[in-house]
Image (cartoon, helix red, strand yellow):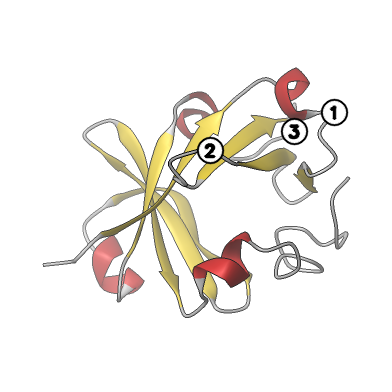
């Protein structure tokens, strides 16, 4: 049995919602814009907007997802309907998305601290954000 630990919520939004925020990051890999949203409950929420050339599954682009960390992502993915293949967007962080009862769910295996993940430097010059910074 895989143990899941809550990590974050991802929510699709229109590009107009986050375009003017200087903290919005752009990923040319997926033609996707992302903004870490702060809130009083300190629940990590990522807003995502998708460009016309986005290659991600339409369900990822249209529906919110919940993300969980797992100890062994290969084991957690066994027998699952995978809608985003396993990849390593930056060193020490591997993820994939599955469809569970019609709901996109992100699974993450990481050795990074939350501060490193949500900080402003770990993503720079990574596979996900090859341009190295916000747009």
User: The residue tagged with tag 3: helix, strand or loop?
Assistant: loop
Q: Please state the horizontal and vertical placement of residue 62, each as a whole percent of the image.
A: 51, 24
Query: Please, is residue 66 above or below residue 113 in the view?
Result: above
Q: Which residue is disc 2 drawn over?
A: 39
Of label 2 and label 3, which has the lower sequence position? 2
Whether pointer 2 and pointer 3 mark residues with C-beta atoms closer than 8 Å, the reply is no
Q: Please state the horizontal and vertical placement of residue 67, each as a whole percent of the image.
A: 39, 50
Q: Which residue is disc 1 drawn over?
A: 20
- Calculate the distance from the C-alpha at mark 1 to the C-alpha at mark 3: 20 Å
**Which residue is drawn at the image coordinates 68% and 41% (left, top)?**
35
Which corner quadrant holds the N terminus? bottom left
Q: Which residue is disc 3 drawn over?
A: 53
**Which residue is drawn at the image coordinates 75% and 40% (left, top)?**
31
Of label 1 and label 3, which has the lower sequence position? 1
Left or right: 92, with 69 as reference point: right
Label 1: how many residues lie within 10 Å, few (<14), some (14-19) or many (20+)?
few
Q: Please state the horizontal and vertical placement of residue 113, each as a whole percent of the image.
A: 51, 74
């Amino acid at each position: 049995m895989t143990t899941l630990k809550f990590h974050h919520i991802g929510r699709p939004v229109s590009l107009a919602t986050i375009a003017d925020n200087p903290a919005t990051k752009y990923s040319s890999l997926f033609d996707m814009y992302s903004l870490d949203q702060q809130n009083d409950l300190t629940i990590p929420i990522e807003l995502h907007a998708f460009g016309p050339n986005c290659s991600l599954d339409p369900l990822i682009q249209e529906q919110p997802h919940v993300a969980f960390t797992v100890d062994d992502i290969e084991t957690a993915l066994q027998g699952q309907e995978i809608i985003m293949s396993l990849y390593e967007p930056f060193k020490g962080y591997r993820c994939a998305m599955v469809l569970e009862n019609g709901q996109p769910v992100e699974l993450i295996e990481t050795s990074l601290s939350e501060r490193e993940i949500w900080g402003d430097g770990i993503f720079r010059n990574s596979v996900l954000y090859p341009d190295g910074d916000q747009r």
